[in-house]
Structure formats: structure tokens, C-alpha cells
Image (tube, coloured by chain):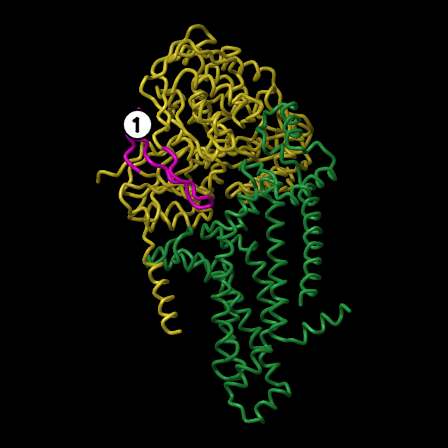
Chain colours: A yellow, B green
Amino acid sequence: MRMKLAGVALAALMGIAAWSPSALADNTLVVAQEAEPVGLDLMRSSIQTTMSVSYNIHDTLFRPQGDASIRPALAKTWKQLDDRTWRVTLREDATFHDGTPVTAEAVKFSFNRIMSDALNSPNRGKLSAFDKVEVVDDRTVRISTKEPYAPGLYMLAYYLPIVPPHAVKEMGDEQYNVDPVGSGPYRLEEWKKGQEVVLKAYDDYYGPKPAYDTVTFRSIPEPEARVAALLTGEVDVISGIAYHQRERIRKSDNAHLTDQMGVMPYLGLNTYEAPFDDKRVRQAVNYAINRKLIVDALFDGEAILAEGVISPRTFGAAPDLEPYPYDPDKAKQLLKEAGHGDGLQARLAYPTYMTQIQQQAEIIQAQLAKVGIDVKLEPFERAVMWDRYKAQKHQMYIYWWDDAPEPDRYVYPLLHSESRDYYYKNPEVDKLLDKGRRTLDREARAKVYHEVDHVLYEDAPWAFLYIIPDVFGVANDVDYEGRRDGFLDMRSAKPSSN
Amino acid sequence: MARFFLRRLRHTVFVLFAISLISFFFIHLSGDPVMLMLPADASAEQIEAMRERLGFDDPLHVQYLRFLGGVLTGDLGNSLYYHVPVMELVLDRLPASLELALAAMAVALLVAIPVGVLSAVKRGSLIDFGSMLGALFGLSMPHFWLGIMMMLLFSVTLGWLPTSGRGTLAHLVMPATALGVSLMAMFARLTRSVMLEVLSLDYVRTARAKGLSEALVIGQHAFKNALIPIVTVAGMEFGFLLGGTVVIETVFGWPGLGRLVVEAIFNRDYPLVQASVLVLAMIFVLVNLAVDLIYGCLDPQIRVFDEGEMK
């Protein structure tokens, strides 16, 4: 008995000793996100944490840049043939992880696959402007859109991963989702469900060889635990850092923060029904909200005040717009002119899963009360919020979008009446957004979006709020800069030189 | 014994059937997953096509019968979210849940039973007072808070244990302890009160009067009878531990079933919710069956009475 006990104790000690911070292991980078990927087929998910892992495995034709421009990736050169056709030439040395070359046929297959009913890709809509991909020769494709579409190549850079036709056909969609064969810098080594995804550098990658041989993606759902894991050196990079935890990382000797994309919450108004069918009431809401106060109180003054629909960090934001000033008197006057001198009542819906949303909603409620708008708060669980949003049941609602570098990425889906005609429709805006898609010259295009920004500022379909820059936490011995799209693409990470 | 077992098995089937029915209709009342699965700009045709493909356009009772057929053939369908068979997902997570539940239960019982017995025997002493005060602390402490505090101390400050994940024994220490502490407190109090009751019974006095040693009286005669309520509660708690540890699973990134189910509910992943609920219910029922069988070993009267009732 005593021997047995001693054995158990010894095993326990060995178990504890067997653990060591894995981030210390040589040439391995450990990344911790909020959630495990739901699959690894980049075509099948639009979830950030899932796509982050998958972007390391898959490559696209172009590499998207922070200013909404593109650089070559699988595509070596490209040429615009007319205002709706591009000829794209692939590089010769790119191969899939099974060693087969990346061909024009694969590009065509990938396009047809993502657009197919069978796959039902959540990203299909983002490529709906495209008409077809034709094979010209083994290394050349002709890509055409239905209408002239300025952000076209940029959208392909994000949403068209090139997959190997033979492998997908052989294993089927379901199997490909757990065992993908990409052409990116990392190949899948192992996926321990519920725990981690292990990626290994692909030796024959055509691009610069990634600095780390192994990248492990773990999921640590609790924010506090993620920060703790970064500070103890168990992991090297983390996402999803709440505002109040940032100071701790900044002050620590082990890690630092790097900027990535931003979260842009907005207060949508139902312009189809009274009282928000009146522009003056919508403007009054904009004057009544003290954005600066909210930003100082909740986000340490670090959020950027929104000066309109287009984030100042996005291509095409009008440089001469200023955020609506906080002016409760003006708000009251506008309400009076609109016939609401005695005040009015409204409902404000928000999804409970958004960070710090409760505080934001309460402050907004208090500020609107000061000008005579009596707001009833309606917190909703994610799916219920979404159902009611689509059923046009909201009156005022807080939702958010990322402040993507490309304006068409969010202004079109949110405010063009052919996309979501739920709460707002403005033929002038529709026309301008269509023009923005058709204008291929970059400078002329920027001017179109400046105009969009001005029209929407005046018409105020939302109360514009602020952009909360998001960050990644990075261990000091790693050199990694966050990308504006918020994906944890580890091909650029390397050991720090200091 | 065999008849007893058979009768319980019949109960089990009935319970599982009822649970499958209730969980099926409740989750279907909660909203339409198709709207969540498609992007906002999906057309009406896309939505209808998706509904049809997933079989959501059939009447509810047809969907339920299809689900029931799936249960009988062992095919509960694919997750709407992960696109893999749901049983695969559930069975992937089950070992982690069992491991954590067993470890937490072991931590709790190994400490609680000796403490409870000692408190009862030394009733009114400083030991009794101290351990019951400790138990009160354990009960009142929210376990997620305890978990985070442990993490700050043992991982961040001392660097002894990993903050999260599963793999080695070191990974198990903090979640099992955090989870075990409140159970420990509950069991210590339970053991104490049951022991106090048993110790005041006539047969214990008789045993003492026969001149048996105090250790034998407490260990053999009193404790064995006190075990029955403890085993009952342990069985129930074990069931809860399997599916109800979402908070601790979240804090320590433990890949258990609880988190899987909660995420599935948020995502309206019907097949996954149904499969997990069914598996959890089955385990719960089986554990309780095991508890009943253990009763029989602890106290033959229960067994005899049960069989007698059947005739």
C-alpha cells in the first residue's frame, strides 16, 4: 500500500515536472485566441478567430495592405484589360502542401467552389460582384466582374483562398475542413480538438520562409487567463484584450501591445418610422451624445471619435469633417422644431455580447434623457438581437463593424438599400456607393467617398460614436506588428533582435 | 438484483426519451439558426435553400421523428457550425469533462469525509468549529473568483502551474481544486451532520456497550451507515459536474462539454445541443443507477425492499 502511494505521489510530481511553459520551446510561437477555430477551410467561415488560423495555411492571389491597396502573393503580375476584366499571371514556384503546383485551373476551381450553392460559403456574398474566372493557360487566368468593381482585387485578396482541386475532390468538403491543403507558409501538423492547432512551416513555400518552425494556436476563453498566460511566458501572442487589462501589459517587463483593427460601434436609427423618420430628430441625437465623455470614461481617452460613417482610418474618409459637437441646447432646439418640445420616448436595443456595451448604453441613455428623449434599454442575446434587427423591430440599436481599410467593405453592406434595406434608404447614397464601386481611379474614387461621408453626416442615419482601436498582446522576445484587418497572420512574426 | 436492474433500465429509457423530447422542442422554440448561419445580405432564395437542405422546412414532429430515428441508428447528424458529426465533437470533449469531474470529486471527498467525521466525533471542539468555519468560507467563495486568484498566485507570481489548457497533471491541479473546494465544503458539512445523527442512534450505543474499540464503532458501524446520503449526493453532484462546469472550463480553458454546449446554444447549433444534452442526461441517469446499486451493497435492506415491492 505504502509503495503504491509512493508511486502515485511520484507520478504526480512527474506530471507537474513534465509541464513547462511551451512558449520557451525553441522556435515555437504560441498564439492564444478567445476561441478554437470551427474549421480550417478558409472558405467556410467568416469568424475572426477561425480565419486567423486559416490564413496561415492558405494563400490568396494578392496580399491586402492597410491602405486598401494590394501586393503580389500567388499572383506575380496582373493587368487590367478593360473596366471589368483583369488578366492575372501566377508565379511559377508556388505549390500546395502536397507538392502539386498552384495552377490557373486551381484558381478557377476555387472561385467556382466558393460561389457554389453546395458549399454555401458565408463569404460568397463578398465576391458577388464577380462574374467568372477563365483559364487562359496553365499560369494565367482572366477574371471578370459583372459591373466595374474598384475594390475587386482587394476583395479577392481576402476572400478567395486558392485550394487544390484534386485534394478537395478526393477528400470532400467535410474532410477538407479539418485537414486542409493550402499553399500558405504553414501547413497543418495536428489539430487537437478543444485544445490546440499545431502548424509547421512549409519547407517549399514560395515566399520568405517564416521565422518560426512551429506556430501553435490555443484557445483560452477567459480574458484574465489569456493575459496571465502572456505575462507568464506560456504564450507569445494573445488577442481579445479588454481595456482595463491593457495597462497591466504595458507596465509589464515581458510583453507589449500592438495595434490592429478597430471596433466601430454605431447607434442605428430606424428612419422608416416616427420619430426618427425626421432628419432633425436624428441630428438631435447626434448633438445630444457626449462622445468625448464616453471615450474618456470607458476607454481611457484612446478611442477615436467618429466624424461620420467612414472611419478616419479608412480610405475615403472626408478629411474636412468634424465629429458632431456635444450641444444639448441645439439638440433640444431641433427636437422642438420637429414637434417634440415635450420630449419623446424611444427603445434602444443592444447585443449583450459586445464588450462594455452595458456602460455605453447607460451613458447614452442618461445623455439622451437630458434633452428630453426618454430611452428604454433593451439588451438582447446575440441571436435574438440579430433576428429582431432583420425583422426591422429595432427603433434605436447599437451594432458594430470593424473599421476595415476599404470603405466599400462596410459602408455598402450597411447603408446601400440593395444590401440591407432594414432601417435606411437614400437613393443619393445608393448612387454614390455604386459610383464608388465603378470608379477605378484611386484619387477620383476617394472623392466619391468624401461625398458619401458628407451626405450621410448631414442625413444622420446613425448617431456616430467612436472607433475603439483593438490590440494584440505580444511577448517582448517576439517582433510582431498587428495588421489592420485584425487577422493573426504569423508569416511576419520573428524573434525580437533586442 | 437482475430484475431491479431491468426495471431501472426501463426507467432510464423513459427518462432519456422525455429529455430528448423536451430539449428538442425547447431549442426549436428559441429561434431560427438559418438566419444566424447566413450573412446579412443573403437572399430569400438562399435562406429557403438552406432551410430545405437542413430539413428545417418540415413540420416539427417530422423533424423530431427524424431525430429520434437518428438516435436509434447512432447518427445524430452534423454540427451546423463545425460541419462534423456531432457525436464526434461530444465524444472528443467527454474525456476532459470526466477527468475534471472525477478529479474535483476526489479532491472534495478526500478532504471532506475525514474532516466531517472528525468534526462530528469531536463535536463542539475547536477542531469542529474551525473546520465548519472553513467549510462556510469554501461554500461562500465563488469558484471562478477562487480560480482566478489561484491563477494569479500559482501561475503569474510563483510560476508553478500553467494558466490554462489540458495535458499534464499540472494542468488539472487548479481547475480541480477550484471546482472541488465548494463541493468539499458541502460534503464536510453533510458528513458531519449525518455522522452526528448516526452516532446518537441506539445501535451505536449498543456497539460501544459491547466494548468495541471507538475506532471500530466509528469506522465500521457508524460511518458505513452515514455513507448512504453521501453517496446519493455525490452521485447527483457528479452529474452536475459533467455539464455544469462552464465557468471553470472557461477560466482555465478546459476543453470540456459544458463550454461546448453553451456555445452550441448561443449558435443555435441544434444537432449539437441535442446530442450533448442526450449524452449528459444518459451519464446522469447511469451514475444514479450506479448509486442505487451501491446502496444495495451498503445496506441490503434497500435491495430487499425494492425487490419485494415488485412482486
Question: Could you tell me which residue is drawn at 54 percent across and 42 percent down?
Answer: A353
* Looking at the image, residue A460 lies above or below residue B246: above
Name the quadrant of the C terminus of chain B: bottom right
Task: Using the image, name the chain to which the residue with label 1 belongs.
Answer: A
Q: Nearer the viewer, residue A401 or A190?
A: A190
Q: Is residue A45 above or below residue B153?
A: above
Across and down, in percent, residue B263 comes to 55, 44
Quick one: SS at disc 1? loop
Query: x, y percentage for residue A450?
Result: 47, 18
In front here: A415 or B64? B64
**In this image, B6 relative to B98: left or right?**
right
Please name the residue shown 57% across and 38% down the image: B79
Q: The residue under label 1 is which amino acid type? A: Asp
Residue A372 on the magenta span: no
Where does label 1 land, which residue? A204
- Residue closest to the eye, B152 or A167: A167
Q: Which residues are magenta?
A: A187-213
- Residue A305 appears left or right of A21: right
Q: Which image quarter holds the N terminus of chain B?
A: bottom right
